[in-house]
Image: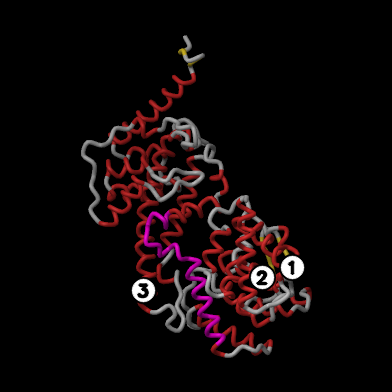
Amino acid sequence: MGLEQNYNKQCLDKLIWAMEQLKIEGSSPELPKIAELIVQTMTGPWRYFHTPDHIFEVGGSDDPIEVLAALFHDVVYVQVDQSVNFNLTYYIAPFIRQVGEHLLIRDAEDLPLDQSFEMVRHIFDFAPGQTLSPINGQNEFLSALVASKVLEPLLPLEFLVQIVACIEATIPFRTTTELGSNSDILYQRLKDVCERFQLKLTDNELIETVKRSVRLSNRDVGSFANESAASFLDNTWNLLPETNHYLKNSSSYTISQYRTALQKMEGFMNFIKPEIIFHQFKDDPDELTYKGLVARARKNIEVGRLYLASKLFTIAFLEALSLRFGRVIPVSTLMGEMPTDGFSAVSLVDFLSPPSNPHQPKTELEKTVLTLLDKGRTQSSSYDIKNSPLATYMVQCLGFDQIIYQRNRAQEFFQQKISHEDFLAGIDSDVKKAVTHGIVQLFDSRKAALCQTDGHPLN
């Protein structure tokens, strides 16, 4: 069975189970088509993290509303897919229009009378004519709209409201306002929607719906609280190619492109606060569990920041060296190609001698990050190896204090406030000499390999 067929089967099994749990009869003929719609979208060419495996994990296996919400919560991801999947436009186009690069809710006079759309719009508190924003719920709103329209023939509005509420809760990284937390606000919106549409949902059922939404949204960002920093970074590395599509070809992306991808991720790591990642509503999860999630997220974010700073300085150093002979230099030119099955190329680090007196980590954080750089994340990605031998070498030669200092200097280089030669001039001369000599030896090894015929050197 192929991977997509296997995903289709898993998705269909979850749909069948959820419908049975909700006691919905007569849905079986439609479910295979729904499973195919979901899986086809979630296996697009740019999907590395937001895949079927992700939605199966986020949905859990205990609650049918959570399972259904998870299956749909990422079907629209415009930044990743670069568009809305064509098969989903059937459900979206009556309500949404495109102006330039932006998606807008149609003006009130152009919207059809549609109860489920109005329900979704009110739960998200969006208005006719509103421009949708990727950072303020665009993808979640459109995913919820698709879920509502796809499931509308099968489920009563009371169930659709609960599913949409769970999807709304997956809008990430929202701070508490004067109206309360996003869970408090969602609860009030649900009360308003129930009154507006005269739904048969009790207050206790609304409270349980918000608790479901908290469980679902916390699982959606659960990798932040992973017990293993290496696994947390694995997920981070799977996110990178979703919005940096040039990374898909490991042999051709340039040093500058790789640096830009790392910069964006570091910017996010420096922005994110562990307190806004996870949610809690009416002591669900309980205080001890919630504090544990926040504490683990804080630790992983600290690891991620130092790890990315180390890699960013290293790639900045290579970029500055590369500018001595070109502006569009692939990473593989200076580092060597990624190893693949049956092929192991010579790499730059093969020509670097270990430092005679390597710097030792001074804190538990530094020890963790050095281990991750040296031994690696838990798995290699399609575009990058799991460990960072050159960054490890830099840390051992310079120590983390100097790495952070040089990372800050690199920002001036990135912003063209100093030249590449000015940046290089401020770096330890022995390190410069060793890495430059290693690159020369790498080029010489390629020259020697090229200048052969039938296994003999060319004269």
Report the residue at 49% width, 20% height from top: 450
Q: How many marks?
A: 3
| In the foreground, 369 or 105 | 369
Residue, disc 3 = 291
- Report the amino acid beneath label 1: Pro
Report the residue at 24% width, 56% height from top: 363
Does residue 117 show up?
no
Give the prevailing secondary structure in the magenta stretch. helix
Contact between marks 2 and 3 (CB within 8 A): the answer is no
Instruction: Tell me the number on the disc at residue 29.
Output: 1
Q: Nearer the viewer, mark 2 or mark 1?
A: 1
Which x, y percent locates residue 56? 55, 64
Which x, y percent locates residue 115? 73, 80
* Mark closest to the chain's N terminus, 2 or 1: 1
Determine the residue located farthest toward the top in the rendered image.
459
Q: Residues within 10 Å of mark 2 (few under 14, many from 20)?
A: many
Asked which secondary structure carries label 2, the reply is helix
Q: Is residue 218 left or right of residue 302?
A: right
* Mark closest to the chain's N terminus, 1 or 3: 1
Coloring basis for residues: secondary structure
| Quadrant hosting residue 432 | top left
Specify whether residue 206 is painted magenta.
yes
Highlighted range, magenta: 205-233
Which x, y percent locates residue 118? 70, 79
Residue, disc 2 = 147
Q: CA distance from mark 1 to mark 3?
A: 45 Å
